[in-house]
Structure formats: C-alpha cells, structure tokens
Amino acid sequence: MLQFHSHIITDLLEDSNGGLVITSSGLGLHKLISSLLHLHHNSQGCLLILTATSSQKTSISQNYQNALEITSDLPANQRLSLYNSGGVLFITSRILIVDLLTCRLPTSVVAGIVILNAHSISDTSTEAFIVRILRLKNRSIYVRAFSDRPHSMVSGFAKAERTLKCLFLRKLHLWPRFQVYVSQDLERDPPEVVDIRVPMSTYMIGIQKAVIEVMDACLKEMRKTNKVDVEDLTVENGLFKSFDEIVRSQLDPIWHTLGKRTKQLVSDLKTLRKLLDYLVRYDAVTYLKYLDSLRASESFRSVWIFAESSYKIFEYAKKRVYHFGRSDSGKLGQSKTASTKKRKLNDSKMDEDQSTSAESRVVLEEVLEEPPKWKVLLDVLMEIQEERDKQASPGEEKDHLVDGDDNGIVLVACKDEHSCMQLEDCITNGSQKVMREEWEKYLLSKVQLQALPKRNAKKAKGPKGFGVLDGVVAASPGKKAEVSSISKQEHDALLAAASKVSKRINKDIVGEDDDQNHVDGGGFVKGKGKGKKKKGSAGEKTNNDVAPNGNAIDGGCSDEVFLRKHDQGLDAESSKEIKKLPPVVFYALESDKKILDILKPSTIIAYHPDIAFVREVEIYKAENPSRKVKVYFLFYEESTEVQKFEASVRRENGAFESLIRQKSLMMIPVDQDGRCLGLDSSNEPQSVISQNQITRKAGGRREAEREMQVIVDMREFMSTLPNVLHQKGMRIIPVTLEVGDYILSPLICVERKSIQDLFGSFASGRLYHQVEMMSRYYRIPVLLIEFSQDKSFSFQSASEIGDEVTPNSIISKLSLLVLHFPRLRIIWSRSLYATAEIFASLKSNQDEPDEVKAIRVGVPSEEGVVENDVRAENYNTSAVEMLRRLPGVTDSNYRAIMDGCKSLAELAMLPVERLAELMGGQKAAKMLREFLDAKYPTLL
C-alpha cells in the first residue's frame, strides 16, 4: 500500500460517522477501497457497496476476493441470509431500498455503506433515500463515499456541500495529484518517459483548422443569443463532453422558447467535437465514412455544414483517401509520389486506351493516407526490440532483469476497441493491407447504400445558414453545372469500383469452393463469367499485381475511368520486420479495466494519452520501485489532442482549487452529538396550507397526526419521486401493481408520466390501455404529467399550438384522451417537490389505501373473475382478455372489433375484408384469419 493511501484510510477512520473522499482520477481508488474492505470483520455486520460499475466491481474483486453480489435473481430468504452473514456485499440501490421499506433487511445487521461515484448523488437520488432511512433507524452506521471526478463535484451550486448533507456527513477529504503526500510517493522513483511528437499530415492540419474555424463560428452565433454564459463558450471547453452538459443545463429552462437555429447549434457543437476527436483517433477511410454518414443524416438540418470552412473538411478528408479528376485537367494531383503510380487496368484494351482522347479519361487515384502514428508505433516497437537485443548479452542481462520478473510485454493503450483491433491487424499484416481492407469496406458500403429503396424525399429549399455560417459562395451557372457533373462522375466511378470489388470477392469465394488449386495468381479478371481467370507467368505477376479488381471501370458515363492503385510495395518490407517485434498487448482505455498489475509490462506506449491512465502508470511504478518501466507518449504535434490533454490537467487542478475554497466556507448543521442533520424535511418549516389548517381547528390546537401512506409500484423506484415523498413524511409501501403507479386512497389511482415517457406511451398506444384499466377499477383515475425542475414548464411554445386537432400534436392527443375518458383527471406538476405537495393535498380528506386490495386489483382469480371490475356488468371481461391475446389484435384496434361484432363466435365467422375494416389493415386481418382457420394437428 502506498503511503498516501494509508493517510486517506487513517483520516476516514478518525470519524466514526464516515466521510466523503475526492481524489484525482487514476490514483488507484479501487485499491484504496479494497484496503478498507480488508479492515472489515464479519462480526461488525454486513458492509454494503452501492453504485459500483461492472469494471469497478471487477477491479475491487481482484484485490478483495470475499465480496459477494446480490442481484434480483436471489429470492428474499437468500438475501436475508446474506445480510445476516456479515460479509461485504455489492448491491443495487433499487434492491436495497425495497428491502429496507419492506423490512426484509434489519438495519441492526448493517455496519456501514460504501458509495462509489459520489459525484452522481443528489438530494433526490435513491442513495440519499437509503442513507436517510438507515440513519433514522441505526445512527451508528458509517457512510464512506468516494469520487475520482473532481470537475463533476464543482458543477452546480455548492455541489460538494449538498452531497455531504444528503449523505449526513461532515468531513470532506480532498486528495489532488499536487497534494504533498501524493507527490512524494509518485515522484520518488518515476518511470522513464519518452515524449514523441508526431507531425500531422498536411490534410490533417487542414481538417483540424477547418473544424476549429467552424466551431468558433458556431460559438459566435451562440453568443449572439444572449442566453448562455459567454465565459463557458470557448473552443477549449468545447473539446470536452461536459461542455454539452454545461450548455444544455443553461438552456433547458428556456428550451421551449428557443428557435430551431439555436437548438441545432447545440447539437452541431457536439458533432464538431467528435470530428476533432475522430481525426486523431481513426484512419482516413473510417473518418471519411463518418463524414459521409453525417452528410447523409444532417445535410438539411445542420448549420455547421453550411459554414464557410466546412467544405474544406469534406474536401481534405476525401483527398486523404482518393483523388478524382481528368488525367489532363490538373484537378487531380499531378505529382506522382513514391506511394502512388498510375496503372492501366485492362491489358487487353491497352491499344484502345491509348487511342482514346486525353480529355475523355477520368482517373480515380487511390491515396489511402496512413495515420502518421502507425509508422511511429512500428518504429518504437522495433527500437524496443533492438534495445533488448543489445541487453541480451550475458553481462547485461542481470541489469535488465532487476527484479527477475520481467516478462517483456509491451502494453499499447488506445482509446477504444476498434483502434486496438486495427493496430493489431496493422502490426500483424502490414499497414497497407489494413488500409486496403478499409477502402474495400468503404466501397462495398457504397454498393449497399445504392441498393436500398429510395424515398421520394422533398428537395431542400436551400441553405438555412446565417451570419458567418451563411456559406454562400458566388458562382456562375456554368461553374455550378460543372461541379454537379463532376460530383456525379465521381459518385459513379466509386460505384463502379465498388461493384468490381464485390465481383472479385464473390469470384474468389467461388474459386475456393470449386477448386483450391485454382487460386488467382495475381492476374486480372476478364469478362462477366464466374470463375474466368487468366493466369500469368512470374513476370506478369510482377507487372500486373494490381489485382482482380483491376478492370477498366465504367463510371456510369461515356468517359473512361482509370484507377491509380496505391503502391503495396512496402508491405513486404514491413512483414519482414514483424518477426523482430516484441510481444505486444493492446488495451482499450474505454474498457476501464485495471490490467497493469496483471500484465506487469516493462514498456508502455500511450498511443492515445489519457490523464487517468498516466496516473495509473505512476501508481504502478510507485508500487514496483525495483521494476524498470519505460513509457512512450505519442502526441500529434500542435493538435487538439495535446490541447485537450493539457486542458484536462488545468481543469482538474482548477476543480480542486475551487473545492478547497468551498471546504473553507462550508456550513454543515450538526446535532448535539456532532452528527450531520442533513436535508431532513422535519427541520423545514411547515407549508402555509398546513399552518392555515391548524389555525382553523380548535384555536390552533394540534391533532394527533396520522401517518400518510402511499402504495408505490416496484418499477417506480427507478425514479426519485418515492424519495421525495418519504422526505415529506409519507410512508412508502412498495408492491407490484397491475394497475397504476401510485395508490393514494381506495378511490384515487395515479399513473405518473415524465415528458419523454408521455410521448412514447402515446406513440405505442400503451397510455390508452393504462387509463382504461384505471377507469375500470378506480373511481378517480389520475394522469400525472411531471416536468423536470430545471427545465421549462411547457410542452411547446404558444406559437406552435394550432387551432385544429392534428395526429402529431401532443395537445390534440391529450384532448382526445380526456374526451374518451371523462372521469380522467390530469395533473400538471412542475417538479418532484410539487408532486409531493399535490399528493399530500389529494390525500387530506381520503382514507388510507389497502395494500392487500391494491395488489389484487386487475389480477384474475383462479376462476378467472377480476374483483371490483366496474365494466364487468357491461362486458364479458374474460372474452375481452381472450380477444386481446389473438394474433393481429392490438391495443389500438380491439375496441373497434368489439364494436363491430357481439361475440367471439361472430368474430370467427367474419371474412377477411370485414376484418380488415375493423382491424385497420390487411396484414393484421390476414394474420387473425389464418390463425382461426388453422387446422388442429393430429397424431395420425
């Protein structure tokens, strides 16, 4: 254990109440927690670990093997036995809160709680609900919360202080990277670091510059709205994911008043950030494919596409993969580099090609620019192997193996799995083969896209750009027609090349199936017949190694299309060098697995440098001071990759400086025993309504307060409303309900819908069925529409509400719902707290609900009879349930079927035409008719 880890544990143990620990990212938080778990003894009671991700569970379990996990698959009696065992248990918040409310978990057997990812906790979260219940019933329980994202703890007003209060904690422990004990441990014997700056290609620099210009233009337009904090709107902040959250959180309260332009700008900034990230992460072909998908999906909506510099992004990305133009026009790159050369694709037409006029020749030249880091990575691996070969002499071997445990593994850390697989393929098969495969996949995707059925989409009226994003370029009509013609020729040429690749792949497969001896030896495919191949001699293999897809490509026009193939001569050299490389393991940073202690590498290459991974390497070296560790950092020179890395360090340091200032000014209320009072509702003043009610009764004399009860469906514990209801002093009874979400009284049933859920329920028809079921069993069915507190209290702006009923309008759908169910009551709630007040007022003159009856509502008995069914007098409910289970019958058409026929027997006699009228379509009617006419299988 490192010294600063022991200091953190000592600080935590000083306060029996617990504390909140915030560390820099990558400082071995899983090891710290594992060390704490080793101090726990079963005799103290069970220790519960909440909000742990799957990767965190795995990392902690590697250092502490005695932890068990409680899942929903375990029955209640097995969970109870695990609670009583006194061990360390991983458990979800939803399971724990239900077990606490149903008294399946005796609080006396709980020693403490460990909460991970404390930055995600708020006063309405389920974790705060759990801590409040445990504190009320067992004040000796300790709570230890941890977070390694300091920048998330400074978002919002007094986030750290509110987190402490909702967890009933007093102590805040801050451990940044620049803390004295941390610096001493990590800088005592640091690893050897080699910083390699890789120059970007010319086109990569052009793309980066263009994206930044477009992003800056979008930010300038955002500033003009005067609705966002200008200080946050910088390009540097735009490099981080949290930037989207910052902008959206500022605009959410007025989101319904914003125009389409502003809303689209928020989405465009997210897209532009991805373009910068993917530029340095992926290869040229993958990047071009992503740009093509953006152009197809966002071409008529996005504002950034019409920006002045956006065309450079597409143009430069295309030039990294291929050049297109006429052979004599100069529009195509005339200079023949060492990696490209022109090849004629069909030897049989050579004489005819020479006689063709130069003006009619269209050339598609493959460039297939490799990421500059690929070659540098290969050079670094070769350098590592050369150094090891030099040290392999008997005299130097002992110095190399200082601790006798060097396995020689080189760990390459990449951002994601795709990069890992691609780099592994690059080292194994050669970089040019990888680029060739990506190029062929790109071409094949063009064919697949062309084969999709086309919709008759309306043409856009024109660019909807504005201001600096207008994107208007003056051009003559003739020039515009020329550009359109070139674009069509380019598209046709790509399709022609793609079709040749597809045919070549199919012929290769057929050739392998027919006869393994008839493998193409480097010749070219001739004609359209399958399996027709022309074998060449050894000399022909050297000259015609351009492949089976080397026919003269018909570009879909009268012009001839030639292909300049990318030179593959370097693959042979690279394949020879592969044998000299050391053993390499690729690691995806997004997997968040802690593998340094497992692999114990002696050399680490940060292909995509990440601040958290850098800290993990420092921890690894500090724990193994006798091991020689060498770290290579690969940065693109003068790129946003360097800027983002440096900005992440500055942002983290700034977050800790802010937390240090907040800690000095915090005011945590405590009781006489020195324990935090938290955000308990009992300490809050009574509402005005309750005060008025008291003064009207017997001169203000208080009555004996009765406990309010609310029956809550199990599925509702995914939301935070039960927590707020409990804060208001209501008793929560969790059960599984067939009808409704909340039962307030024997008469009142509430179906709660968030805004997103409301739209989805209308679209699927589920809401109609839910309201119908509530109307059948309860006298006062209620639809609660709940808005978020930090968002606008409106569906849409007043200007968007029309006078007529339209099928796409949410207001129209609500109006029709109320007309169909006159007893339905709709309640609009601004926030969770407003909902709690509404529930309290609705229950003021009502009896408390019966838990047993609520569970039985809507559930048929063994005889098939449903109790308290209001509609049972008018409908045969068993027959209705039978009808709704037939094929083709849905929530949206079964009522029309009931109106059209009196019984199931009459339904079985209806022809398909009549069924189609009732069911709203031929497909559903045919499905039901086939089911009814199907013969019963016999054993004959």
Image: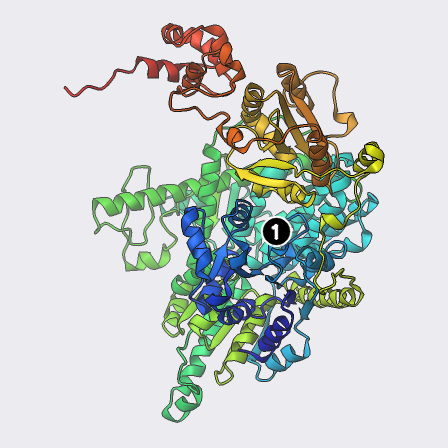
* Quarter of the figure that contains the C terminus: top left
Q: Residue at x 52, y 47 (%)?
A: 103
The quarter holding residue 487 reads top right
Q: Where is 56 relative to 488, above or below?
A: below
227 sits left or right of 727 in the view: right
Q: Where is 712 relative to 217, above or below?
A: above
Q: Identify residue type, mark 1.
A: Ile
**Colouring method of the image:** rainbow
Q: Position of residue 144 (x, y in %)?
A: 60, 63
Say which of 107 and 331 sits in front.
107
217 sits left or right of 849 in the view: right
The residue carrying pointer 1 sits among few (fewer than 14), some (14 to 19) or many (20 or more) residues within 10 Å by Cα, namely some
Q: Position of residue 183 (x, y in %)?
A: 64, 79
Q: Residue at x 71, y 44 (%)?
A: 266
Say which of 266 and 847 sits in front.
847
Q: In this orientation, does residue 656 appear?
A: yes
Say which of 517 and 406 sits in front.
406
Q: Position of residue 676 (x, y in %)?
A: 71, 60
**Residue at far bottom of view:** 395
The quarter holding residue 204 reads bottom right
Mark 1 residue element: helix
Q: How many marks?
A: 1
Say which of 875 and 430 sits in front.
875
**Residue at far left of view:** 940
Q: Residue at x 76, y 40 (%)?
A: 253
Q: Where is 447 relative to 909, above or below?
A: below
Q: Position of residue 369 (x, y in %)?
A: 53, 58
Q: In this orientation, does residue 472 appear?
A: no
Q: Which residue is mark 1?
A: 133
494 sits left or right of 784 in the view: left
